[in-house]
Amino acid sequence: MTNEKNIGLKSVLMKIRTYIDEGAEARKLLNADELYVIGEKLYGAIATGHKLVTFGNGGSAADAQHMAAELSGRFMNERKSLPAIALTTNTSTLTAIGNDYSYEEVFSRQVQGLVQKGDFVVGISTSGNSKNVINGINEARKLGAYTVALTGRSGGKLINIAEKTITVDSDKTPIIQEVHIAIIHTLCMILDELLKLPRVLRT
């Protein structure tokens, strides 16, 4: 029995180490230059009086809310609150649209009413194929917002729809979600750093 326990423990430890290594590798493959360019776009939107709007399903909904919280609250630097909305938080809105129209329209319908030209819109989908996220990004583009998708390795359909897609080099949903948070935190860091610079150095 003890030997079986040891074998089982070794198997679990191997899986833990593999999981940690895969996540670290996926994060290391992020492109810092690409993230900086997107962070500049986010700064440009906020600096000109526009807002962040973000959405996703399940764990990606939590990531969207996390991103909005970092702007409306604070990330690491003390600063004024910044305009940010996650379209996943109002259960009355979500259930009304889902019931009266369809779940595929829960984000696009809100985008119609909230997004303006010049806003920065982030759709999060680990597969890149979530229909309601695709519809939300499509609607945001029609309205003249700058659109970014966070996805997994393939990019899914979103890679051909959003103006910029950041893919995570993994097919495992938990790892993709963990790296999405790293991407979100990096974009928030870039925004904070650019906001600290004297105005003459920001352009």
Image (spheres, rainbow, N blue to C red):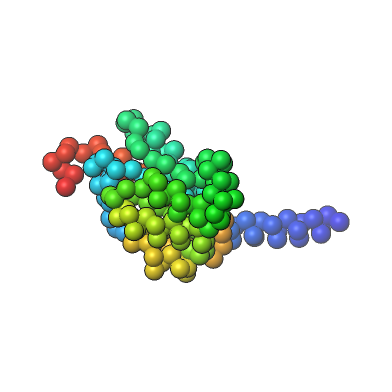
Q: Along the line of sight, which residue is nearer the eye, 78 or 14?
A: 78
Q: Along the line of sight, which residue is nearer the eye, 20 or 36?
A: 36
Residue 35, x across and y down, in percent: 33, 55
Residue 132, x across and y down, in percent: 50, 58
52 horizontally vs 25: left or right: left
Residue 119, x across and y down, in percent: 32, 48
Please say whether residue 75 is visible from this viewpoint: no
Residue found at the very far front of the displayed protein = 100
Identity of the residue drawn at 62% across and 56% down: 16
Q: Along the line of sight, which residue is nearer the eye, 39 or 83?
A: 83
124 horizontally vs 48: left or right: right
* Quadrant position of the N terminus in the picture: bottom right
Count of numbered labels shown in the rendering = 0
Residue 201, x across and y down, in percent: 15, 43
57 horizontally vs 184: left or right: right
Quadrant of the rendered image containing residue 200 = top left
Please say whether residue 48 is visible from this viewpoint: yes
Identity of the residue drawn at 40% across and 50% down: 112
Residue found at the very far left of the displayed protein = 200
Identity of the residue drawn at 23% across and 42% down: 48
Identity of the residue drawn at 54% across and 65% down: 171
Q: Is residue 196 above or below residue 53?
A: above
